Amino acid sequence: MNLTDRPRRLRRDGIRSLVSETRLDAHDLVAPVFVDATTDERVPIDSMPGHERVPVDEAVARVREVRETGVEAVMVFGIPESKDERGTRAWADDGVVQEAVRRITAETDAYVITDVCLCEYTSHGHCGVVEADAAAHPTLTVENDPTLELLAKTAVSHAEAGAEMVAPSSMTDGMVGAIREGLDAAGREDVPIMSYAAKYESAFYGPFRDAADGAPAFGDRRHYQMDPANGREALREVRLDVEQGADVLMVKPALAYLDIVRDVRTEFDRPVAAYNVSGEYAMLHAAAERGWLDLDAVAHESLLAMKRAGADLIVTYFAEDVADAL
Ligand code: PBG
């Protein structure tokens, strides 16, 4: 056979790794950490094997475990001791995230990112302020503009507790601008914003909502999170966040949205983050538990695909396991 171009020549051991285009690196991974004010011991999260909600007293120990794997960054989520209509514990100076972040930054060298949202803090489980009689309305709406001020207050309180970056995830129009203004007014021009810029209304968040106790009590998030059918709209969302000062652009979920990761990489000059969400983690674990998939291999391959699509960093529940195996 007279084949001049034989790609297989470059696939042998030795040359294979020399020509590999993409590599996973512990430096690119962010490990989510759940801090829970309702418990004084670690509680395993059933649908996310290997993950736990930890009390504030264990937050430092939990982050040290992450650091031991070589992963440098954590994303802190909080479960407050109480919830109310407006989510007031989200911006409390002695709130669960604020307390945990204070300790983590004092006692570890981890880079601390906080998730800025109200859904874990509101009694109705929505990501913002809802209309007074929302539960009775089939077409509930989260009120956009009144939510902005609360998100800004929350972000500022995280920064004041020591958070090095804030990550707003509520899909409120104008959230990045409001938070940027709030941080700047508080003298925190130094704190970057990683915006959940293109966040879809996805069924892949199921296990997280158990983990963070943030499922909506009524209605759903379709009127603020994006329609999975839409790709062009993601670019519009991202463009708005760039205009408002987003420093890092996140696409979420990751695996089913790699086209969006690629589009955002191509269109914008900011770092791109992919959020490998709870359902993506749970499904690989469930299949591996049955002996149907090799967990380490599929986790590695999934994260590699996100990098190949254009992600600079990946928020993933696999962070520790993958970093350990590198
Ligand atoms: C809060 C938030 C959610 C996730 C991250 N931040 C839940 C949601 O939007 O319902 C999901 C993360 C995951 O599934 O791993 N708004």
Image (cartoon, grey):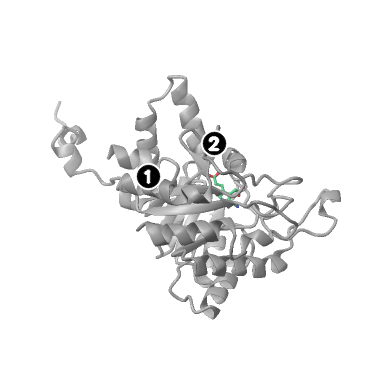
On the image, the x and y values in percent for residue 189 come to 46, 76
**Other-residue count near label 2 (Cα within 10 Å), few / some / many at <14 / 14–19 / ≥20:** some
- Element marked by disc 2: loop
**Quadrant position of the C terminus in the picture:** top left
The answer to whether 4 appears left or right of 122 in the picture is left
The amino acid at mark 2 is Ile
Which of the numbered marks, if any, corresponds to residue 65? 1
Which residue is disc 2 drawn over? 45
Secondary element at image label 1: helix
Instruction: Please determine whether, in this image, residue 242 is positioned above or below residue 14.
Output: below
> Which residue is farthest top?
291
Q: Quadrant of residue 127?
A: bottom right
101 or 202, which is in the foreground?
Answer: 101
Determine which quarter of the picture holds residue 107: bottom left
| The image quarter in which residue 232 lies | bottom right
Q: CA distance from mark 1 to mark 2?
A: 17 Å
Foreground residue, 310 or 147? 147
Q: Residue at x 65, y 59 (%)?
A: 89
Residue situated in front as seen by the camera: 80 or 293:
80
Residue that appears at 61% across and 39% down: 210
Of circles 1 and 2, which is in front?
1
Quarter the N terminus occupies:
top left
Where is 15 relative to 267, above or below?
Answer: above
134 lies left or right of 228: right
Q: Is there any visible trace of residue 232 in the rendered image?
A: no
The answer to whether mark 1 and mark 2 are in CB contact below 8 A is no
Query: Can the viewer see residue 59?
Result: yes
Task: Give the image location of residue 132, x and y in percent.
Answer: 83, 59
Q: Earlier in the sequence, mark 1 or mark 2?
A: 2
Q: Amino acid at mark 1?
A: Glu
